[in-house]
Amino acid sequence: MKKLILSVIAFMFLITVSSVRTEASDFDANYYAQRYPQVANTIGWDADALYKHYLSTGQKDGLFPNAMAEVEGTAKLIALQNAQASGNQAAIDELTKSMAAASAALQTQNQVQAELPQLQLPEATGLYGTYVDVNIASQTVTLFVNNVPMLSTPCVTGTPKNGRSTPVGSFYIKEKIPGKKLKGATWNVWVDRWMRFTDSRVGLHDASWRSKFGGNIYLTNGSHGCVNLPKDAAYQLYDMVSVGTPVIVH
């Protein structure tokens, strides 16, 4: 009977989560939102908001901060199997207790998720007639007006490492400023057209320091999260959008 209980706990642990401490540079907002849609459905896809949720709630509830942490979480299962094989009862008891807690967290998570309406994923662009589409895979920005593409341009999004990837999700233009200085830990630059779409200072803007856009530039020399545009395209887009225009990043 005890062996059966341990087997059930081990099976549940394969599909559950384990608490992992992490730094901001190890937190993957895209992974977190998609792995735990009940969280994104409640607080949105803003990277800062998701990270704050992880620190205040997710870590305590056993949610993983990134895909690698989830893979590494299976180490407890392997350790339990080894402890069973060697007959180390102290290790079996400790691991069983830890994994049972993780299984309980999974049950609570599933219950909460079942009670929430289905998450509207960012790909559901048909919800909007006029919106800015930011396609990370193709590195393009397209403005649709009444579902007709009116402007399309290559871009450079955030480097997908060290927490610099552009947050995915459904947003809207929150401010337009014709000239702004952007300051950060390692940058201090002027942009002519600034269109912010998150509360964490992520926006679309011109990037005069770049000579090329599109392709795979973002993988090694991307932005710190913003969407960099050629100057002409940034000027055109700025004139064609308004505060409140939806921005879909996917």
Image: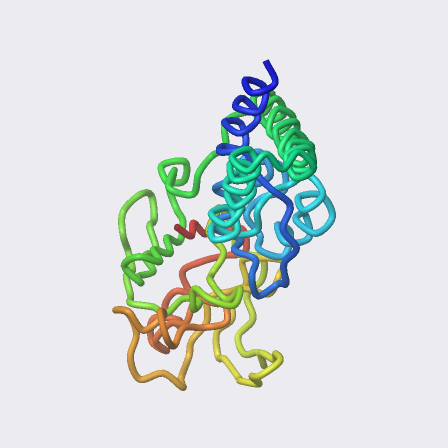
Q: In which quarter of the image is residue 238?
A: bottom left
Q: Which image quarter holds the N terminus? A: top right
Which residue is most to the front? 86
- Is 7 or 151 nearer to us in this picture? 7
Estimate the x, y position of residue 16 in percent, counting from the top left: 55, 34
Q: Where is residue 215 in the image (x, y as percent from the top left)?
A: 25, 69
Q: Quadrant of residue 208?
A: bottom left
**Relative depth, front residue between 238 and 160:** 160
Q: Residue at x 31, y 43 (%)?
A: 147
Query: Residue 111 occupies which quadrant of the picture?
Result: top right
**Percent position of residue 247, x then y:** 45, 52
Residue 78 as seen in the image, left or right of residue 56: left
Kindly identify the residue that appears in the image at 36 percent across and 83 percent down: 210
Q: How many marks?
A: 0
Q: Residue at (66%, 33%) from the top-left corner? A: 89
Q: In the image, is residue 188 above or below residue 103?
A: below
Q: What residue is drawn where x is 44% and y is 58%? A: 241
